[in-house]
Structure formats: structure tokens, C-alpha cells
Image: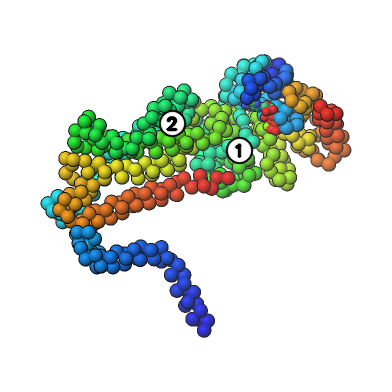
């Protein structure tokens, strides 16, 4: 009897551990049922045909590169674009947060440009840089610039005044205050901005790859598959996009939990 | 030469409406090397302001501050400040917090670690070198702040109600430890407090300020021998006297 109770408890514990899987599983079943009912692979392919595409990530799809090749292209673009955006945003944000005059001068520009969605820059990017890496990097950089900038500004403002004053009484120069107090103090918030910025950059790259004239990348692949009515490829590509985005965000968050724990634990 | 000279210092702030609000009025004070001075006064009388002016963090509206005869015109490592809220760097381990000032001064890594360890031991936290500030209690953090300020060997140590947030027991223990450290290092200390008990236990001289605008009401010599007994008759009499000074300083009396 007692053993049974224990057994049941253990089962309960396990069940709780798998609770997160309930809704995704339900979703997959609903999909499969819907696909069977609709019975039209050009509208909703069945699970198996999508799984088949995902199971062969290295084989070329309709002569336009494999899933992996296209994913690598997209990743390269997003990394270059994000790096450019963040490298511009962090110093500007620190300067704005630290010196009143810089903020007063730069803030109006930020207010004007921030509401323009990154994708609204596409035509201008094409006009300036033609089709290719440069215009994609431009759009991705703009997409990641603002979240990183605003969080950096926030982070620098949240640096306690006494942290800075303590450094001053210990003889720190303005440079040392920036590098040893302001930056490390603001870093957790800057990091949050980078996570948000990278998420937006990843959305931008997929959209940018749908610009006319592009011939690689996950965004390109799914649009190309649409032209051939290969819905299972579209969905497989979307899944890859989602998984990569989730993977990167998780990695960045792990890092954050590990290195910036002081922010939560500080009392 | 006097170690520290506060020469006719006054300070006004502008309030929201642009009117001048006087916080300090004509404060003059001379401190000998190695003296332990307590600055005592009711809340809002300008104690923190006075300390910040001495530390060079705030410009006086009038008057000068001189350390070893040289005017103070900005924060300097000759004046160590210990803030009321500890202001440790939460991303640095305890030892790296203490070594911060040495790092700033460009002291080589091995030397500054050794020096930091020495001060860590002095404040009795040897086992916490690798802890982060959030792992420490309030009293322990305050000790780290003391060690950080002392590690760069300032000529004068300024402390702003350092034990204000501690419970009575910890507070008493910290006071004894501070005196211990003071006797070992022979620093000149300016210690702000609003506790008469604390001032009588710690100080060579107590500077009693009036309510706002703060001015010096009286400087009281404490001639009780050290180590002091909090309950001795001399201390009780002094406490009574100083309390009287503070009460008289109130406008409603
Ligand atoms: N930056 C400032 N701007 C305007 N007024 C100020 C400023 N700093 C201090 N004051 C005013 O000066 C007076 C003295 O303040 P201060 O902080 O020095 O008092 P205190 O004696 O340290 O008080 P407490 O014991 O509560 O810490 C207060 O009335 C305060 O409102
Ligand atoms: Mg104060």
C-alpha cells in the first residue's frame, strides 16, 4: 500500500516535469488532424512531410541550397548586422547616459527615427546599397540599434551615484569611472538590450532576405518555396527560424543568469 | 600644522522655486592628526553636506577646506569617504572591492591583492575574500566599505552614519572594532552620527551642530580614558550634557 503511494507520488512528480509538453503535443495533434481533414498539401501539409524536410537538413531543396546552408547565410548576416548596430548603440548610449549635453543633442534624433520600423528602410537601403549584404546589414543594424541604445541609456542611468562618488574619492579618473563603474554597473541592462536587439535583428534578417534579388538565406528559402507551392518547405523553414531564434535567446539568457546574478540578489 | 581645517564653510542649495536654502552656515573646525571627531546633529542639519564638502564631492558656497595646508578642490584619495549606503560594487568580489582604489592607482596585481588581504583581515572578514557583497550582512558590508577606504591609506577618513542601519548589538560591536582599527592605523577620523551614545563612546571631540542651517553650537571635549565603559558616570554626565545642547538647539524650545 505504502509502496503504491510512493509509486504514485513519483509518477506525479514526473508528470509535473512534463507539463510543459502538453500544449505543444496538443498543437501537433490538432495540426495533423486538420491536415488529414483538409487533405490538401498546398494548404496544410501533414506532419510527416514537414518532418521529412527537417530530417534531411543537408540536402539541397529545389536547387536553392540546403536548410543548413541557408541558415548559415542568415546567421552570418544577422551577426554582422547586429554587431554593427550594437557597436554603434553602446557608446552612444553610454555617452547619452553620462553627459547631459550629449543626451540633449542626440535625443531628438532618436525620437524621430525610432518609430520608423526597420523594414520601412528597405527601399532606401536598396537605393543606397543595391541588393546584397550591405543593404541587409544596414536594415538589421537599424533594427538592433534602438533596443540596445535605449537599454544602454537606462542601464547607465541606473548606475548609483554613490558608486561613482566612491570611485571619485578613491581617485578614479573619468575614464576609469566609465570603464570600471559605469560600464560594469550598466552591463546587465545593456545585455538585456542586446537580447532584445538580437531578437529584432533575427526578424529583420528573415524579412530582408525576402527583398527582390536575394538568392540565399532562410527568408529567401521560404519565399522561394512559396513560388513552387512547397508548403512543407515553408513550414520547415519557419521551424528552423524559430528554433534558432529560441536557441540564441536561451544562450544569451543563460549567460545573463550566470554573470549578472548580482542584479537580482542585490538588496 | 593642523591635519584638517574647515575654514568658514557655508553652503546654500537652490530649491525648486530657485530660492536659496541655507544648509550650512559659517562652520569652522580644526582637526589634529590622529584625532577622532564625531559630528552630531539632528536630521537635516547638514551633516552629510559638511562631509561631502570636506570630501570634495560638493563645492561650498563660501569658505575653504584644507588638508595638510592644501585646499581641497575635488575628490582626492587623501580623503577616504565611507558612505551611509556602503556603496560596494555588487559585481566585484569582496577582495576586489577592497582592492578597487589600489587598482585605480595602478598598483600591480599581486601587491594590491596582498594589501587588500591585509585590510580584509583587519576588519575580520578573512574568510569572505571571494564572496559577493550580496552574500554579506549589513554589518559585514560596512566593514568591507571601511577596508576599501582604508586600503589606499587616506590622510583623513570620513564616515557618514556608517552604523545607522545596524541593530544595537552589531552597532556596539562595530564601534569597538572601529576603535580597534583606529588605534592600529592612527588615522584622522571624522564620523557623522545622530546618536549621542555613539558620539560619547567614540570621539575625542564632539562637534554639535544646530538645526538647519547647521552651524557649530559647541565643540565638546571627551576626556574619558579609553577603552571606555559605556555605563560609566563620566559618560552618563557627558551624554546628559550633549543631549541638553541638542535640545536647546531646537527652535521649539
Ligand atoms: N542637493 C541638494 N539640493 C537641495 N537641497 C539639499 C541638497 N542636499 C541637501 N540639501 C538640503 O540641505 C539640508 C541638509 O542636508 P543633509 O543631507 O546634509 O542633512 P543631514 O544632517 O545629513 O541629515 P540626516 O541626519 O537626515 O542624514 C537638508 O535640508 C536638505 O534638504
Ligand atoms: Mg545625512
Q: Residue at x 63, y 40 (%)?
A: B142
Q: Is residue A90 left or right of residue B26?
A: left
Q: Is residue A68 left or right of residue A11?
A: left
Q: Is residue A90 left or right of residue A212?
A: right
SS at badge 1:
loop
Q: Residue at x 20, y 48 (%)?
A: A223
Rendered location of residue A234, percent (x, y): 22, 54
Q: Quadrant of the C terminus of chain A?
A: top right
Residue at the extreme left of the image, as rendered: A63
**A18 shown above or below A237:** below
Letter of the chain that mark 1 sits on in the rendering: B
SS at badge 2:
helix
Rendered location of residue A116, percent (x, y): 34, 35
Give the residue pinned by disc 1.
B86
| Crowd around label 1: few <14 · some 14–19 · many ≥20 (10 Å) | many
Q: Nearer the viewer, residue A116 or A15?
A: A116
Q: Which residue is drawn at 83% across and 41% down?
A: B231
Of the four image quadrants, the one with ligand 2 is: top right
Q: Which of B247 and A210 is in front in this view?
A: A210
Q: In terms of image quadrants, where is residue A39?
A: bottom left
Q: In terms of image quadrants, where is residue A160?
A: top right
For discs 2 and 1, the disc positioned in front in the rendered view: 2
Give the residue pinned by disc 2.
A94
- Separation of marks 2 and 1 at Cα, in angstroms: 25 Å
Is residue B109 visible to us here? no
Amino acid at each position: 500500500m505504502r509502496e503504491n503511494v510512493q509509486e504514485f507520488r513519483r509518477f506525479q512528480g514526473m508528470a509535473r516535469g512534463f507539463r510543459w509538453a502538453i500544449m505543444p503535443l496538443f498543437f501537433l495533434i490538432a495540426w495533423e488532424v486538420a491536415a488529414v481533414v483538409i487533405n490538401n498539401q498546398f494548404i496544410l501539409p501533414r506532419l510527416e512531410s514537414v518532418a521529412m524536410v527537417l530530417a534531411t537538413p543537408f540536402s539541397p531543396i529545389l536547387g536553392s541550397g540546403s536548410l543548413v546552408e541557408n541558415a548559415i547565410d542568415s546567421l552570418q548576416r544577422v551577426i554582422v548586422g547586429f554587431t554593427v548596430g550594437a557597436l554603434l548603440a553602446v557608446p552612444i548610449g553610454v555617452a547619452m547616459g553620462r553627459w547631459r549635453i550629449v543626451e540633449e543633442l542626440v535625443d531628438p534624433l532618436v525620437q524621430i527615427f525610432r518609430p520608423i520600423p526597420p523594414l520601412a528602410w528597405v527601399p532606401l537601403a536598396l537605393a543606397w546599397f543595391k541588393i546584397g549584404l550591405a543593404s541587409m546589414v544596414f536594415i538589421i543594424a537599424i533594427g538592433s540599434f534602438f533596443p540596445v541604445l535605449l537599454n544602454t541609456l537606462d542601464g547607465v542611468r541606473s548606475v548609483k551615484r554613490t558608486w561613482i562618488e566612491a570611485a571619485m574619492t578613491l581617485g578614479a579618473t573619468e575614464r576609469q569611472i566609465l570603464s570600471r563603474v559605469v560600464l560594469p554597473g550598466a552591463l546587465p541592462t545593456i545585455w538585456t538590450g542586446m537580447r532584445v536587439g538580437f531578437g529584432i535583428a533575427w526578424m529583420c534578417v528573415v524579412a530582408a532576405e525576402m527583398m527582390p534579388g536575394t538568392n540565399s538565406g532562410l527568408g529567401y528559402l521560404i519565399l522561394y518555396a512559396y513560388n513552387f507551392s512547397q508548403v512543407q518547405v515553408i513550414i520547415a523553414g519557419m521551424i528552423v527560424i524559430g528554433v534558432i531564434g529560441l536557441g540564441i535567446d536561451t544562450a544569451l539568457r543563460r549567460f545573463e543568469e550566470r554573470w549578472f546574478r548580482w542584479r537580482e540578489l542585490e538588496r | 600644522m593642523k591635519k584638517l581645517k574647515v575654514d568658514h564653510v557655508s553652503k546654500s542649495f537652490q530649491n525648486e522655486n530657485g530660492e536659496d536654502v541655507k544648509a550650512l552656515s559659517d562652520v569652522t573646525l580644526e582637526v589634529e592628526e590622529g584625532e577622532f571627531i564625531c559630528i552630531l546633529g539632528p536630521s537635516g542639519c547638514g551633516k552629510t553636506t559638511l562631509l561631502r564638502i570636506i570630501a570634495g564631492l560638493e563645492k561650498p558656497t563660501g569658505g575653504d577646506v584644507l588638508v595638510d595646508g592644501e585646499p581641497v578642490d575635488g575628490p582626492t584619495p587623501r580623503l577616504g569617504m565611507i558612505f551611509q549606503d556602503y556603496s560596494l560594487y555588487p559585481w566585484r568580489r569582496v577582495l576586489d572591492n577592497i582592492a578597487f582604489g589600489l587598482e585605480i592607482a595602478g598598483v600591480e596585481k599581486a601587491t594590491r591583492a596582498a594589501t587588500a588581504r591585509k585590510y580584509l583581515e583587519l576588519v575580520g572578514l578573512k574568510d569572505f575574500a571571494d564572496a559577493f557583497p550580496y552574500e554579506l550582512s549589513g554589518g559585514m558590508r560596512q566593514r568591507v566599505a571601511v577596508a576599501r577606504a582604508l586600503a589606499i591609506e587616506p590622510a583623513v577618513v570620513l564616515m557618514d552614519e556608517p552604523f545607522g542601519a545596524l541593530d544595537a548589538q552589531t552597532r556596539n560591536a562595530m564601534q569597538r572594532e572601529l576603535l580597534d582599527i583606529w588605534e592600529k592605523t592612527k588615522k584622522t577620523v571624522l564620523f557623522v552620527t545622530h546618536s549621542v551614545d555613539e558620539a560619547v563612546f567614540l570621539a575625542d571631540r564632539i562637534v554639535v551642530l544646530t538645526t538647519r542651517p547647521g552651524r557649530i553650537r559647541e565643540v565638546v571635549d571627551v576626556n574619558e580614558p579609553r577603552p571606555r565603559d559605556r555605563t560609566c558616570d563620566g559618560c552618563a554626565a557627558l551624554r546628559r550634557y550633549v543631549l541638553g545642547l541638542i535640545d536647546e538647539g531646537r527652535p521649539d524650545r
